Amino acid sequence: MVPNVRPVTPQPLVRVLPTFPSTAATPPAAASSQYVARISPANPGDRYRCMLPGCNVAPVNVTSIAFGDSNTTNFLSGVSNWYERLQAKTVNTKFYTYQYNNQSIGGTSVVPAFNSNGDNLQYPIDAKLSQMTNVKVGYIMLGSNDAWRGVEVTSFQTYYKQMIDKIKASGKVERLVVMAVSPMISPFNCIGPSCWSNAHNPQTERVVPYNQFLSSIGTYCASISYNCSYVNSANGILANSTYINASDGIHLLNVAQDKIATTMYNWIMTQNFL
């Protein structure tokens, strides 16, 4: 006798895919060959659930722009600036590609300053914003020229906030990185018998308090609902002639430039740019 057996309806096999942290810069190594990024309108942080094949998407293009002075340009033959070095470090992957736009101008400052010809040496942020296209990241590294000129800390704070306000209002920079004012050594770009640094120390009287203000810029950014933050890009740069050009005391040499590039690369690797 055959016992009564209740028929069983076959169920489709369901494969449960593992999930990975949405904040990770890259997927776990073991999964990197099996997963590709997915951009989901419903859940933009869901990056690594998509199994190959059939879910290939274009990598996210991380566009950026640099607003800086001569320390973000190749001011001296044989010296390559940190932004170029950063570009060399950020190799395109199937998750991200990178684009760089260096709009730095030597001699420029945060606060209005005028040369002997009456030219305003303030960084022309309005013009640069009007000319640029939208980017995911903006980098500001300014303040060295303000320091050696002896610009008051309160003025520096006021005009720096105004620059951030303008960048936010443009709607063209998704997130902004405020970078440290780099260390300076004697002669502090002192170019005449009556220059400010003959009677003062721009490093202790200006660079240090400037950076104290910048390090708390996140509070101001939060108050205006803008995604901007401070990165101590001067970390590891020593105040000596190995890092800083001894002839003027403010221009950064290759060792210092690479320190900045490494710091900013490490920052990029912690970010989710979806």
Image: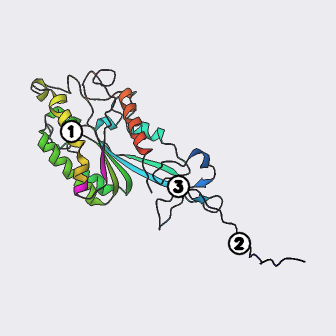
Foreground mark, 2 or 3? 2
Foreground label between 1 and 3: 1
Q: Can you tell which quarter of the image residue 113 is in?
A: top left
Q: CA distance from mark 2 to mark 3?
A: 36 Å
Read off the residue under disc 1.
Answer: 212
Q: Position of residue 80 (x, y in %)?
A: 40, 32
Instruction: Return the residue at label 3.
Output: 59
Picture quadrant where residue 202 is located: top left
Give the class, few, some or many, for how many residues have Cα within 10 Å of label 3's Cα (few <14, many ≥20). some
The residue carrying mark 2 is 11
Residue 154 x/y as whole percent: 12, 43
Which amino acid, mark 1? Gln
Magenta-drawn segment: 222-244
Residue at image location 60% in from the left, 49% down from the top: 31
Quadrant of the frame with the N terminus: bottom right
Counting residues from the start of the chain, the first of labels 1 and 3 encountered is: 3
Outermost residue toward the front in this view: 1
The kind of secondary structure the magenta stretch mainly shows is loop
Three-letter code for the amino acid on which mark 2 is drawn: Gln
Q: Is residue 104 left or right of residue 51?
A: left
Quadrant placement of the C terminus: bottom left
